[in-house]
Image (spheres, helix red, strand yellow):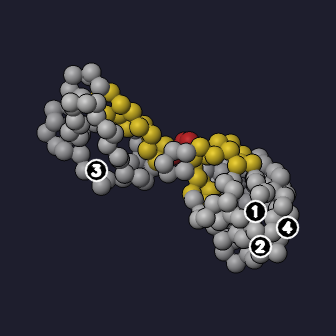
Amino acid sequence: MFSMSIGLSSLDLSGLDTAKATNMQGMFYLCKGLSSLDLSRFNTSNVTNMTDMLKDCSGLKKLKTPKTSGTATAALPYTMYDKDGTAYTELPVNASSSITLYTIDLRHTVSFNDASDKFVVSENVFDGNVIKVPAAPAGYYYAVYTTSACNAPYDLNKTVSGDMTL
């Protein structure tokens, strides 16, 4: 349908009725200009073929998946991750709700460092998400500050926009 639309940079699929679709093979093949794609309203219950649906979508950074109910799967152009860091190489099968997947370049490394440099833990956090403080080793705790001088507590409700050490 949109195959080989190399210059396509945005696409509103909210009005597209896919309830009777059985074949989505190559649907977005070579859509290199798309950086995000919202398939959350797609009804894939009758789809039996998603081969190469997203093949060579090399610009894709964010993908909102549909609820799925069949066995057909679409291979992703590369490994993508949900907000919890779970890796996907294809659209999830039998997902009861939509999930948003991201490419790895939207993840930031947040390192937690104790004052002695004895316990250093790093977490991957997606751009725009908040930090979850990891469990400290037994007998220790993390007090999260923005600087090594420990003069300002870090606001854990603040969203992450880059790599950082706390």
Mark 1 vs 3: CB contact within 8 A: no
Q: Identify the mark nearer the N-term, 1 or 3.
A: 1
Which of the labelled discs sits on residue 134, or is there none? none
Which of the labelled discs sits on residue 156, or is there none? 3
Camera-near label (2 vs 4) is: 4
Residue located 29% across and 25% down the image: 119
Q: Residues within 10 Å of mark 4 (few under 14, many from 20)?
A: some
The disc labelled 2 sits on which kind of residue?
A: Thr
Q: CA distance from mark 4 to mark 1?
A: 11 Å
Q: Residues within 10 Å of mark 3 (few under 14, many from 20)?
A: few
Badge 1 element? loop
Dividing the picture into quadrants, the one containing residue 104 is: top right
The disc labelled 3 sits on which kind of residue?
A: Leu
The residue to which callout 1 is attached is 70
Residue located 72% across and 46% down the image: 77
Camera-near label (1 vs 2) is: 1
Q: CA distance from mark 1 to mark 2?
A: 14 Å
The residue to which callout 4 is attached is 22
The residue to which callout 2 is attached is 18
Badge 3 element? loop
